[in-house]
Amino acid sequence: MTQYKILTGLALMLCPLTLAAQSETTALQLTHTYEPQGSARYAALSGAMGAIGSDPASIARNPAGISLFSGANRLSLTYGYDWSVNKGSWYGGGESKMENSAFRFKELYYQMGAKGGSNFSVVLAARNAGRFDRSFSASASGIAANYRRSEGTSSFDNSLADYAAAGVNNLQYDQNGQLIPDATLASRNAFSNGYPWLSIFGAQAGWIKSPNGRGGLYSNNYLDGSGRIMRPSAAYLSLRETGAITDYDLAVALRATETLRFGASFTYTDMSYNLSSIYREDFEGGDYLGLQNRVSISSGGFRVGLGLLYEPLDGLRIGASLYTPSFMYTNIDASPTVTPRKDDRNQTPLVGPATAATAFRLHTPWRLGASAAYIIGHRAILSADYECAFYGSMRLGETGRSDMWDTGSRYDADNERIAAHYTGVHTLRLGAELMATQRLALRAGYRYSSSPVKSGVVSEGYAQGEVFVPGTQVHYTLPGALNSFSLGAGYRITPDLSLDLAFVSQQRTNQVFAFPFVRDYGPVLNRRDPDVQSGKVQPENLLGLKAAQESLRQQELLLSLTYRF
């Protein structure tokens, strides 16, 4: 990537939300929660049903599996009770703890089995495909004592005010040194003139300033008695995410021969997401800054899944599946509020324009899966599924363009960063089912999913490069690996009615950043300076703050009732 492209992309990501209200972090935020769920049997086996099939929940692993159900039709409903415990720790601020719980719909399906000599099976289903239900808070203390300047460079832990200053500095640099005065950022038209919103807010709230107000090297305006820039002494970050992802499936499967089966699924995904966040920094002497964000997102799109099952030996099944991205049309609205400095004459919080609504396209990752199952007579089943979701293939696009990958899109830099920062998520699922009696089945499962973040993006809690964020929603989360264990049982109450139960426990550790690493080109604005030309003066690497550690434990209890008719 050329230096020009880097700076152009950075300027776009820091520009008004009406210009670029989404970013690489938005793509990850909306897609990583996606996890199609299903029946209690599916949950008890940790989703390792790609080659077991029969159950409509297996559509999420391999749509060919529904061809294994024959005979009567069936109708099933699954509900669950979810609860989560979220712990956060940040610098020396101690550990915070937040809890959530709720009863939730999981799945409803109707399945028409292959009967009367038919080789076709059909399923109609609605399922929970992920929930946004997250509360996180963390307090950092002693930041100044943890001040870190990288050896041999000008990198250091910094304030959100430094980040706001870098936004306007980089825009000036990208515009060949064309200076932006304080009065321009303070004007009523600033939000519609292509300037970074956070820089506008920072100038109007007294966070940042330029020499004599004429533009140039903008800098942090939180100074000690000697006129030196202060590091934050403490910081606080709190966020609440709510929303849901729901899949509506139509699946068809064909039994080509006794050993070979094919299947296809067509899925419409409906998504809603809401975020409320608060960030605050405190400085010595009682000064402070604050930033609040409210974001609302709605999205809908389609995906196609293809699968096959082959039985090379009696009792052994192997399968393969491919799922296209969900081609999502997404609407977003945002409302930021900024708290000015303590000594600002007007203590009224600063609020952005009435609406920052816009629309964009999102292509979720491709998914490729392989599965195997061994059926031991009528007594037991062992299964294993592997899937890779290619997060580096996510794409953002403009709604008015016919081709997502047209060059010249304002999301080119974001899409390059997606490919550079994110990788395939490798998921292994193992499941076992034992028929204890003719009516009672006992089940267990395990799941492991790797992190979507490439190695080297974070080191020792610090981001190692620039990450693009949308407008003033500067905080972002990088998910870690997930481990999940499950247990369950199924009981055939009558020949037509069965009850299934499952318990699932999963845990993940995430890294939450208050705002990104950024290179501040303010020190090299004067390109005619001999020190700049010789390379003696370099842009500053602003590390941001060290990531807060988030430990998330989620548990759920599911119940499915299935009726055959």
Image (cartoon, rainbow, N blue to C red):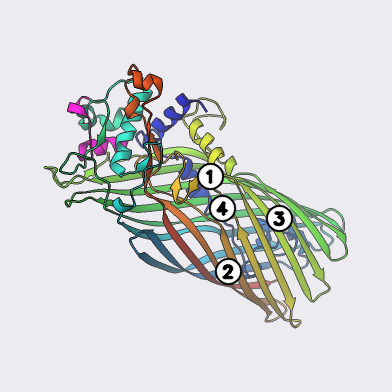
Q: Is residue 435 above or below residue 456?
A: below
Q: Furthest residue to the front?
A: 152
Mark 3 surroundings within 10 Å by alpha-carbon count, few (fewer than 14), some (14 through 19), many (20 or more) = many
Q: Residue lying furthest bottom in this view?
A: 437
Contact between labelled residues 1 and 3, with CB atoms less than 8 Å apart: no
Residue that label 1 marks: 456
Mark 1: which amino acid? Gly
User: Residues at badges 1 and 2 in contact (C-beta under 8 Å)?
Assistant: no
Mark 4 belongs to which amino acid? Ser
Residue 210 is covered by the magenta coloring: yes
The residue where tag 3 is placed is 62
Within 10 angstroms of label 4, few (less than 14), some, or many (20 or more) residues? Answer: many
Q: In front of the other: label 2 or label 4?
A: 4
Residue segment shown in magenta = 194-214
Nearer the observer: mark 1 or 2; the answer is 1
Secondary structure under badge 1?
loop
- Disc 3 residue type (three-letter): Asn
Vertically, is 200 above or below 325? above
x and y, in percent, of residue 517 in the image:
40, 41
Q: Residue 78 got which mark?
A: 2
Q: Is residue 388 left or right of residue 512?
A: right
Quadrant of the rendered structure where residue 395 is?
A: top right
Gap between marks 1 and 2, in whole Å?
41 Å
